[in-house]
Amino acid sequence: MNNNTALLVMDLQNGFVSRFAENEEVLLPFQKAIDAARQNQIPVIYVRVAFSEGYPEVSPRNKSFSALAKHGGMTVTDHATQIHELVKPQQGEPVVTKFRISAFAGSNLEVILRGKQIENLVICGISTSGVVLSTVREAADKDYVITVLSDACLDADPEVHRVLTEKVFPRQAEVQTVDAWTQTLS
């Protein structure tokens, strides 16, 4: 499985980590997944959301992002859009910039996955009801084999996280803890 698998580490950028991770221990499952992927020669691909100066990618009809364009922040150079120090990419690990919720929306993710001949996606990120949900749905529609690392997903609403990981994701993905996933690698 490893040779055509990639770990997607999504939206673990400073602006989101600061809102969702009240302490750094919350990032331990992410760190564990990243370490396991690296040790098993599984490509780690980072995904972040960021916008160009002047927000040309943001439509006034986009409820989520139009307010952001008015208030500023979240541009590609902002501290808030950089990958958090505790999970930062190593040399050669791509950082994909997306302009919407799904990791595929407006990004070069699919080109990278095709280039690396990836068929299996192992997904973690912030938030479960945002990037994880949107990416799982789109990846399933694109016929990827998907594993969601339930304890390496964070959401502001624990009940929404539970419903997604226990009831929604299993219809389109394997849902495992980081420990269970890493055991499948040996």
Image: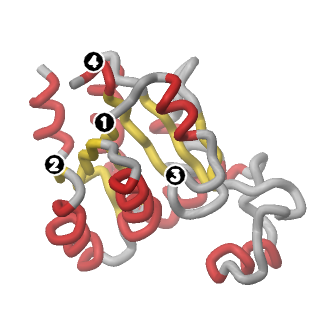
Image depth: mark 1 or mark 4 in front: 1
Q: Quadrant of residue 167?
A: bottom left
| Label 1 – label 4 distance at C-alpha | 14 Å
Nearest to viewer (mark 3 / mark 2): 3
- On the image, numbered disc 1 is attached to which residue? 120
Q: Which residue carries the number 2 mark?
A: 176
Relative placement, left or right, of 167 versus 64 is: left
Q: Is residue 157 above or below residue 77?
A: below
Give 94 or 113, whichever is nearer the viewer: 113
Kind of residue indicated by mark 4: Asn
Closer-to-camera residue (138/30): 138
What's under tag 1, amino acid-wise? Asn
Q: Residue at x 27, y 74 (%)?
A: 158
Q: Secondary structure at mark 4?
A: loop
Mark 3 or 1, nearer chain start:
3
Of the numbered discs 2 and 1, the one sitting upstream in the chain is 1
Circle 4 crowding by C-alpha within 10 Å: few under 14, some 14–19, many from 20: some
Q: Residue at x 64, y 46 (%)?
A: 97
| Residue position for label 3 | 103
Tell me: 138 left or right of 82: left
Residue 65 position within the rendered picture, expressed as x and y whole percent measured from the top left: 68, 73
Looking at the rendered structure, the kind of residue marked 3 is: Ala
Q: Is residue 24 visible?
A: no
Q: Secondary structure at mark 1?
A: strand
Mark 2 vs 4, N-terminal side = 4
Q: In the drawing, what numbered circle is on residue 40?
A: 4
Question: How many C-alpha atoms fall within 10 Å of the one at disc 1: few (<14), some, or many (≥20)?
Answer: many
The CA span between labels 3 and 1 is 15 Å
Q: Position of residue 53 (x, y in %)?
A: 87, 56
